[in-house]
Amino acid sequence: MALSFSTAGESHGPAVIATLFGLPFGHTLDVDWINAQLKRRQGGYGRGGRQNVERDEVTVLSGLRRGVTIGSPLTLVIHNKDSRLDKAPDLANVRPGHVDLAGVLKIGSRNARDVLERASARETAARVMAGAACQGLLREFGIEVVARVLSIGDVVADQPMGQGYSAIYQGPDAARAVRDAGEFGTLDRAHDAALKAAIDSAKAAGDTLGGVIEIVALNLPPGLGSHNHWDSKLDGRLGQALMSIQAMKAVEIGLGSEAAGRHGSKVHDSVLPMPPSFGRSPYTRGSNNAGGLEGGVTNGEPLVCRVHMKPISTLMNPLQTVDVSTGKATQASTERSDTCAVPAAAIVAECAVAIVLAQALLEKTGGDSVEEARRNFDAYLASLREFRQ
Ligand code: EPS
């Protein structure tokens, strides 16, 4: 069975739930790692009041015996402390930028509460539970996924595939430690003051900020994904996984949109007839403008994606809207919310990429157990080395 996952739960319902189908037997679930990712998702400078209420920790309801996966669906749950779904106030002054108006028109309700509860970014806690579990599986095959914040608003902390990319390449754990010692998801402290000032200024104006996040996956073998079908190409699957995170408006891979303005000779990555110093491809590439993907298939270089997050939609200095219960002009509602959730979204994006990569890895290896998958994986790596002879 292919690896898949689903999420359930509303922001103020009893729980947030993630279920992973198709994990092989024999993986020791790293619950501490999952909880550490959940804690990071709740963090970041500019987060709203909900994060002072919740202490997101995972409870495993199925799929493990003595802490080890048995191949059955893995059900992961966070119990909501703020669980007042039926009592949460009605909302008719729809908030521009949220699903509010589009959603009530879709379902024929006059109360945006009927749609915003499921649309809430609270759902990303489920994505993180599933993705953090997948990071643990990927780690069994030496594959690491690390995201960092490149910019928040107009404050740029790093360039695409810039210094932080090199730091991650040199050592993902050390890079994460630097990132998580700060509050902005960046890989150095040099820009913290400017980032804090920008978020404070937005908050003071009743406004919000978005930003740009880069996700890097290391040590992927060439050959994951597919060139055969539109919906199995890995770039398309990564695009959906990232675009479907709340507030995302653009995804790039490698050079991304910059490639559109260059000549081919300044985009495509030459192939050199020698093994790389680090990595699983039989050959070295002269550059990595492709971001580790060509034709929907990994090429053995680090995978590099970026995702662009719009500013949080709820504004404390609200925009003009309509009361959908009367049709009259009014001001948008102001629910409790974040000024900036970009650092948190970096953890969500890291986990979303990990789910897709775990799916692609298991598609390649097969195997009902991690041991069988590893035997098949090692045989495949050996076949790649034969290209060097
Ligand atoms: C969030 C939970 C939500 C929001 C926020 C992020 O909780 P509540 O609605 O109770 O405050 O704080 O979600 C949004 C701003 C949004 O637009 O969905 C979370 O857990 O990440």
Image: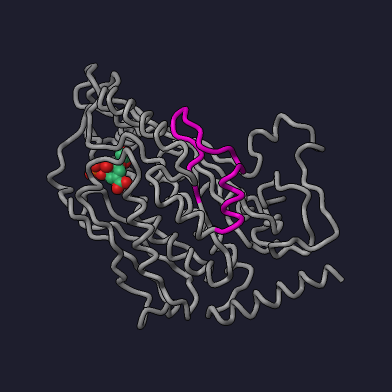
- Residue 333 as seen in the image, left or right of residue 159: left
Residues drawn in magenta: 147-171
Q: Quadrant of the C terminus?
A: bottom right
| Ligand 1 rendered quadrant | top left
Please tell me in which quadrant of the rendered image residue 323 appears: top left
Q: Residue furthest top?
A: 329
- Residue 68 as seen in the image, left or right of residue 51: right
Give me the residue at 30% from left, 71% from top: 61
Give me the residue at 34% from left, 34% from top: 98
Image location of residue 36, percent across then percent down: 36, 60
> Looking at this view, is 83 or 154 the one in front?
154
Q: Is residue 70 above or below residue 13?
A: below
Give me the residue at 36% from left, 67% from top: 32
Q: Is residue 349 above or below residue 26?
A: above
Q: Can residue 166 be found in the magenta stretch? A: yes
Q: Is residue 69 above or below residue 8?
A: below
Numbered-mark total: 0
Q: Is residue 352 visible?
A: yes
- Residue 57 as seen in the image, left or right of residue 82: right
Image location of residue 73, percent across then percent down: 40, 71
Q: Is residue 7 visible?
A: no
Image location of residue 176, percent across then percent down: 47, 55
- Residue 146 as seen in the image, left or right of residue 327: right
Q: How is the image coloured?
A: one colour
Q: Can residue 337 be found in the magenta stretch? A: no
